[in-house]
Image (spheres, helix red, strand yellow):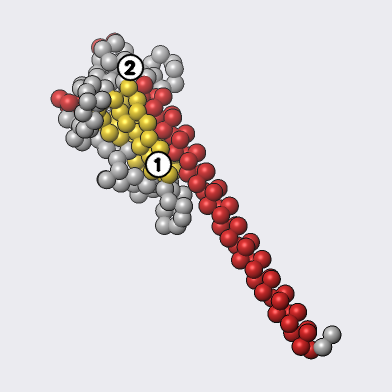
Amino acid sequence: MSLMEMMVAIGIMSIAMAGFSVLFVKSWQMNSYIFETGQDSFIASRAVRILVDDLRRARQADNGDYLISSASDMDLVIYIDIDNDSVTEKVHYYLDESEDELNVGISNPSGSGSSITYPSGDDAVSTLAAHVVNDSEHPVFSYFGNNYFSDNTPFGTPVSSGEIVNIRIIKTSLWVDIRPYQSPDHITVESFAQLRNIGL
């Protein structure tokens, strides 16, 4: 093999290796994109499913308070028998925007009969979903009355104490993005929960 033939062979092999390298990198990026999209979708779907299931079980507090204590874009305090022990807990869902976490705080009542009270803070806090990137333009919670199907304009937030009793439907919307400044873009999952135990 002459020197010229060897140089041509090396050149062809270098081009082929560069092509394989580019193909490998692109395949790796595509697999990473698909994997991260799947992770985002799983996180958002799981959290929304849990939220909607919980909200449908909201009920009057054990001290007689209305089933919703406060309602705003990123923060909701509601009463639920969250652990099925026949005691109604105060449940606090909120977005910790500094940590990009949707948290749930749970507080148990104390006392008995007419002296039952709930603490002002949360007894225990856990993370329901990480990498949640909702902002003021994309609230976690939106609130609607009975006329949702004819007028789907949500209540202004925070919902006033006079309007809270008119809430019948709560929309939950989560924007989840594991790497906010890189592809893939966020995944959005939303669902609606109709309050079933009003007046019970």
Q: Which mark is residue 196?
A: 2
Residue type of the residue flagged with mark 2: Arg
Q: Position of residue 34 (x, y in %)?
A: 54, 49
- The tag earlier along the polypeptide, 2 or 1, is 1
Name the residue rendered at 60%, 57% in the picture: 27
Position of residue 140 in the picture relative to residue 66 (left or right): right
Name the residue rendered at 32%, 31% in the picture: 171
Q: Quadrant of the C terminus?
A: top left
Residue type of the residue flagged with mark 1: Thr
Residue toward you, 4 or 24: 4
Instruction: Report which quarter residue 19 is drawn in.
Output: bottom right
Q: Give above or below for 131 relative to 23.
A: above
Determine whether label 2 and label 1 are within 8 Å by CB. Answer: no
Is residue 61 in view? no
Is residue 25 in view? yes
Position of residue 15 in the picture relative to residue 162 (left or right): right
Q: Position of residue 55 (x, y in %)?
A: 36, 24
Q: Quadrant of the N terminus?
A: bottom right
Q: Position of residue 47 (x, y in %)?
A: 44, 34
Q: At numbered mark 1, what does the secondary structure look like: helix, strand or loop? A: strand
Q: Position of residue 198 (x, y in %)?
A: 27, 15
Residue toward you, 48 or 130: 48
Q: At numbered mark 2, what does the secondary structure look like: helix, strand or loop? A: loop
Residue indicated by mark 1: 188
Name the residue rendered at 67%, 74% in the picture: 15
